[in-house]
Amino acid sequence: MNQQESQQSEASPLMRRLIMLLAIVVFAELVVMIGSLVTGGDISGADLAASIVRILLVALSGWFLLFRADDDEILQASPAPAAASPQSDGIVQVWPNIDELTHTSNQRGLTIHMLEMMALAERYHHKLSVCLIKVSGLDALNNEEREDTLIGISTVLAEMVRIPDKVGRYDEEQFMVIMPEADYAGASLVAGRLQTSLDKNVNDRISISMGVAEFERGDDLQRLLTRAQQALEKES
């Protein structure tokens, strides 16, 4: 006997209660009728119809509760949908703000975060700086070496920056570090430490250059990034 047959062969507790309730109601109606006959009363067609209606109402109410309980059991027994995995049926799930290779923020994620930090800096007069990091020489590497190099750079950056800083891959050959509560001098100090660590830990066939710019009140994103890019070009 399979599981389905076993379940069908066993009356549910609610079904047993429903049968018992119907039996009690029918018995009570019969007692009333018999009592009326014993005392010399008469049972009219209206009385009989009323008894049948009461029995049917109880039966319908019971069936409604029974089917509702069955639906609840089905919902509870139904397996929850499987969580979406990063890779299913050969399709790679894309996280809109995360770089697929380095698992740091991508240009979209960096831009959104930068705009949020700029709004706070403008409104509350907070310090804010940005550091652009250019990786030169990637073309001389094969694909595996290039990917390993970029992953290594992102790892070093993530380990070296401060807790509130945001690291991400801005484009194919550039990374960005967003540094809230850091003026130009403080950001330059952080950039110097990053430069030293990267020079020691990345492929010796590539070179690293950095450009730092501090947010000024009234800046838009393009103006701030232009200054950072100009600083980067001076260092290249």
Image: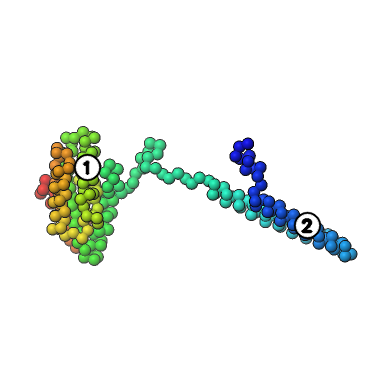
Question: Does residue 8 appear anywhere in the picture?
Answer: yes
Q: Which residue is mark 2?
A: 27
Label 2 environment density (alpha carbons within 10 Å; few <14, some 14–19, many ≥20): few
Coordinates of residue 86 in the picture (x, y in percent): 37, 42
Q: Amino acid at mark 2?
A: Phe
At horizontal 65% and vertical 44% (from top left) the residue drawn is 10
Left or right: where 98 falls relative to 67: left
Name the side, left or right, on which 127 lies relative to 37: left
Q: Inspect the image, locate mark 1, and give the three-letter code of the amino acid beneath it.
A: Gly
User: Which of marks 2 and 1 precedes in the sequence?
Assistant: 2
Query: Which quarter of the rendered picture does the C terminus lie within?
Result: top left
At a point 88% along the width and 65% down the height, the residue shown is 39
- Give the x, y percent position of residue 185: 13, 58
Q: Nearer the viewer, residue 172 or 62?
A: 62
Q: Which residue is mark 1?
A: 152
Gap in angstroms between the C-alphas marked 1 and 2? 83 Å
Q: Quadrant of the N terminus?
A: top right
Q: How many marks?
A: 2
